[in-house]
Image (cartoon, grey):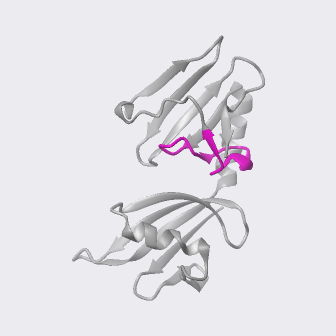
């Protein structure tokens, strides 16, 4: 359900517990496109949702830049967590409380959902994703008994969104791309 990796910036070698599993090659593999983007960013760590190139399963990647004592980049280490664990947890909570639960980025793009078709393919509509309320839960009342509760999760850089439409069947309010 979880795996670790480290990438050498000097050689492009991608190491896992099984040894060198590949060389990062952005010219030949679009699954490696994240690497130069992350290296060029000012962020020291990154959260990314992508499909595993071997199993085609959704994975949440937590990437962290590794530097030497002088601050020179040595590479990236990371953890990949299969999405199914989080989906199972969300599914159980959705059924128990008759709500819809998502993790979304600052644009509202769905990063985690119990329905795979929505992951990185749908945006939540009319959801308060305000940076000014980062440390607060934001409650929004809809028509009838509908409500939305939003909370920015700082260490993820994503928003937790819980929606209820006041009935047994919840509506995700998604706008699929």
Residue 40's image quarter? bottom left
Q: Is residue 137 left or right of residue 86?
A: left
Q: Which residues are magenta?
A: 104-123
* Residue closest to the eye, 174 or 53: 174
Q: Residue furthest top?
A: 144
Residue 168 position in % (x across, y down)? 77, 22
Q: Is residue 117 above or below residue 169?
A: below
Picture coordinates of residue 12 (x, y %)?
A: 48, 84
Q: Nearer the viewer, residue 110 or 76?
A: 110
For the residue pair 177 and 60, the one nearer the viewer reads as: 177
Q: Residue furthest front?
A: 177
Measured from the top left, where is residue 17 in percent x and y? 58, 78
50 left or right, relative to 117: left
Residue 121 sits inside the magenta stretch = yes
The residue shown at (52%, 20%) is 140
Q: Determine if the magenta segment contains residue 141.
A: no
Look at 67% across and 31% down and name the residue there.
Answer: 173
Answer yes or no: is residue 20 visible.
no
Residue 5 in view here: yes
């Amino acid at each position: 359900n979880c795996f670790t990796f480290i990438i050498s910036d000097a050689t492009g070698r991608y190491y896992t517990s099984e040894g060198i599993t590949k060389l990062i090659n952005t010219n030949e593999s679009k699954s490696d496109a994240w690497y130069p983007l992350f290296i060029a960013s000012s962020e020291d760590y990154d959260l990314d949702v992508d499909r595993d190139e071997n199993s085609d399963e959704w994975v949440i990647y937590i990437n962290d830049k590794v530097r030497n004592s002088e601050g020179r980049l040595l590479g990236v280490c990371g953890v990949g967590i299969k999405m199914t664990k989080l989906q199972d947890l969300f599914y159980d909570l959705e059924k128990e409380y008759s709500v819809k639960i998502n993790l979304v980025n600052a644009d509202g793009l769905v990063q985690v959902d119990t329905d795979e078709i929505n992951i990185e393919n749908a945006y939540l509509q009319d959801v308060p994703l305000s940076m000014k309320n980062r440390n607060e839960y934001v409650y929004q009342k809809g028509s009838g008994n509908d409500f939305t509760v939003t909370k920015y999760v700082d260490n993820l850089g994503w928003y937790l969104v819980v929606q209820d439409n006041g009935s047994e069947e919840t509506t995700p309010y998604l706008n699929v791309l």
